[in-house]
């Protein structure tokens, strides 16, 4: 029987445990001794899978390095729904802020690979938004993308400091004002096309067929 499945399963156990401890207690506060003891393995076994703590940190952050999902929804709807998702995340018992921001603050070294990964992740998200705004021909999409990114980051920090998931709703309202003022179409306020003869008006109820 191949040993690879067992090796991969152990890597997942190590990453699951390290991720929970890194996020909940802090990257600097948690050492490999603590992670190994939590799992019930030796440090040597841990190092067989992750030769250094820095590699374990990178693997932990890589799990959070998710690409933006494509959608057919209008851009404004996608962005506002993201703030809805943030509010649900803020309301969980395990919310401890953004793992990338936490990593930058705790590592304190701009040359650390973990810091560089965090910066790359934030910039990747901002560039995705900038490219989407460019397709809508708004003025200065680069600055607008940065402003929306600041609203996201501000909501995360405010929710963490205040313990109030509603910070996401406040940021969502600000994002709507900012984006619509820049000319991003709002599907909720878009004018409805004039009904054709024989078609019901928007909001009217179709008559039921005779039984």
Image: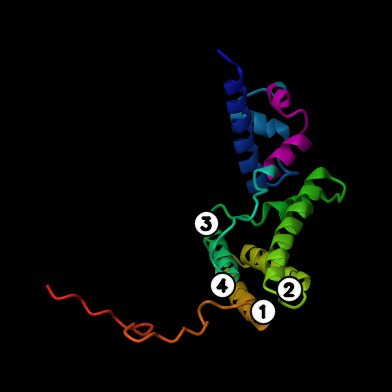
- Kindly identify which numbered label has been placed on residue 92: 3
Which residue is rendered at x = 56% and y = 60% of the image? 71
Q: Earlier in the sequence, mark 3 or mark 1?
A: 3
Real-space Cα separation, disc 2 to disc 4, in angstroms: 19 Å
Q: Which mark is residue 169?
A: 4
Label located before the other in sequence (3 or 4): 3
As measured in the structure, the alpha-carbon distance from the residue carrying label 3 to the one carrying label 1 is 28 Å
Closer to viewer: mark 2 or mark 4: 2
Say which label, 2 or 1, has the lower sequence index.
2
- For label 4, the crowd category at 10 Å Cα-Cα, with few meaning under 14, some 14 to 19 and many 20 or more, is some
**Dot 3 crowding, Cα within 10 Å, few <14, some 14–19, many 20+:** few
Name the foreground residue: 40 vs 202. 202
Q: Which residue appears farthest toward the front when viewing the image?
A: 197
Q: Residue 176's spot in the image, x, y percent?
A: 61, 77
- Find the magenta span and give its range: 45-61
Q: Residue furthest top?
A: 1
Q: Is residue 130 left or right of residue 81?
A: right
Give the class, few, some or many, for how many residues have Cα within 10 Å of label 1's Cα (few <14, many ≥20). some
Write down the residue under mark 1: 178
Dominant SS type (magenta):
helix
Indicate which disc, 2 or 4, sits on the residue closer to the N terminus.
2
Residue 130 part of the magenta-drawn span: no
Q: CA distance from mark 1 to mark 4?
A: 14 Å
Task: Give the mark toward the camera: 3 or 4.
Answer: 4
Q: Residues within 10 Å of mark 2 (few under 14, many from 20)?
A: many
Where disc 4 sits, the SS reads: helix
Which residue occupies 40% across, 85% down? 195
Q: Is there a contact, CB below 8 Å, between mark 2 and mark 4?
A: no
Q: Nearer the viewer, residue 189 or 27?
A: 189
Q: Label 2, on which residue?
A: 144
Q: x, y percentage for residue 144?
A: 73, 73
């Amino acid at each position: 029987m191949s040993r690879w499945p067992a090796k991969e399963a152990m890597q997942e156990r190590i990453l699951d445990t390290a991720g929970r401890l890194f996020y909940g207690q802090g990257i600097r506060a948690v050492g490999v001794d603590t992670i190994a003891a939590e799992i019930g393995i030796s440090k040597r076994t841990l190092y067989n899978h992750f030769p250094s703590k820095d590699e374990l940190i990178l693997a932990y952050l890589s799990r959070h390095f998710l690409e933006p999902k494509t959608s057919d929804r209008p851009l404004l709807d996608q962005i506002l729904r993201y703030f809805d998702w943030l509010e649900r995340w803020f309301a969980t018992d395990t919310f401890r802020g953004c793992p990338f921001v936490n990593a930058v603050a705790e590592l304190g070294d701009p040359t650390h690979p973990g810091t560089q990964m965090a910066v790359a992740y934030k910039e990747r998200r901002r560039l995705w938004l900038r490219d989407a705004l460019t397709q809508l021909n708004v003025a200065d999409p680069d600055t607008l993308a940065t402003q929306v990114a600041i609203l996201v980051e501000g909501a995360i920090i405010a929710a963490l400091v205040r313990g109030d998931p509603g910070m996401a709703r406040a940021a969502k309202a600000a994002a709507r004002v900012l984006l619509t003022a820049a000319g991003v179409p709002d599907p909720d306020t878009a004018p409805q096309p004039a009904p054709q003869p024989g078609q019901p008006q928007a909001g009217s109820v179709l008559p039921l067929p005779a039984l």
